[in-house]
Amino acid sequence: MMARLAARLLRSTSGVAMTEFALTFPFILGVGLMGMEVANRVLVQMQVSQLANLIADNASRIGEESMLEDRKIYEGDINDLFYGAHLQGGESIDLYEHGRVILSSLEVVPGTDDQQYIHWQRCIGKKHHSASYGEAGDGRTSNTLAGMGPAGEEVIAFDDEAVMFVEVSYDYQSIIGEPFTFDDGAITAIASYTVRADRDLTGIHQRDASDPDPVANCDSFTDLSAYGFPTSGR
């Protein structure tokens, strides 16, 4: 009896497929999860790059139009600019919670031919990240700033013009985590646009000095709530 049962078990192949599936399933699952992480990181990288371009493009356009004087920009314009980026895509990745946006105005030192300097910067985001391509005031007193951007690929401003240069650094938030993600590090993006119209380059103004708008100083690490904007919802 036992001999016949043993012989039947040896000849049986009904569980082979199930056994093979059980052995290969962890590998298939791991590859699938890794693919999901890679695809998500690519999408987030694209989104961060698009936000950098959006902010730089809009920064080159903002300002109060006037037929009598160069276009002025105000602190409220900068705050609205950052809020607009939040609504356009920053909210979906929680950009200001996990990242940092640095907006710089690259200009030519008045009275010089082409000496580059960073006139002003405005920043937002809780991530502690320092500007990679210079800080406000750099190049003002000495001709040491070649421009802004990676070495050998710097963008420059021309006399009586300004370039809006944006740097974004974002800590990637994995959807699964180790060991299925290849890189949990920061995602960075830069973008720059020349100011579209004649702009008042004396600085950023306040519309109402008696009730000034908050200033997005680069020594603070805050999200939109510090400027009176909601951090979620539209």
Image (spheres, rainbow, N blue to C red):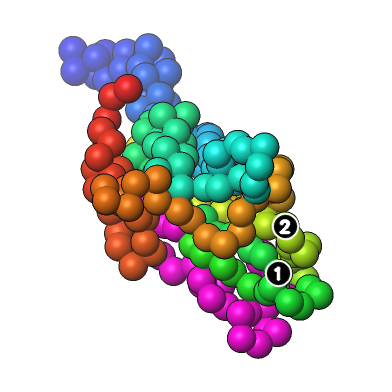
In magenta stretch: residue 27: no
Compared across the picture, whether 163 is left or right of 80 comes to: right
**x 72%, y 57%: residue:** 161
What stretch of residues is rendered in magenta?
122-150
- Front residue of 13/95: it is 95
**In the picture shown, does residue 206 fall above or below 46?**
below
Mark 2, residues whose alpha carbon is within 10 Å: few (<14), some, or many (≥20)?
some
Distance, label 1 to label 2, CA atoms, is 8 Å
**x 73%, y 77%: residue:** 111
x and y, in percent, of residue 149 in the image: 66, 64
Amino acid type, residue under disc 1 in the picture:
Val
Q: Is residue 125 visible?
A: no
**x 71%, y 69%: residue:** 108
State yes or no: discs 1 and 2 in contact (Cβ < 8 Å): yes
Q: On the image, numbered disc 2 is attached to which residue?
A: 161
- Secondary structure of the residue carrying tag 1 is strand
Q: Is residue 77 visible?
A: yes
Amino acid type, residue under disc 2 in the picture:
Glu
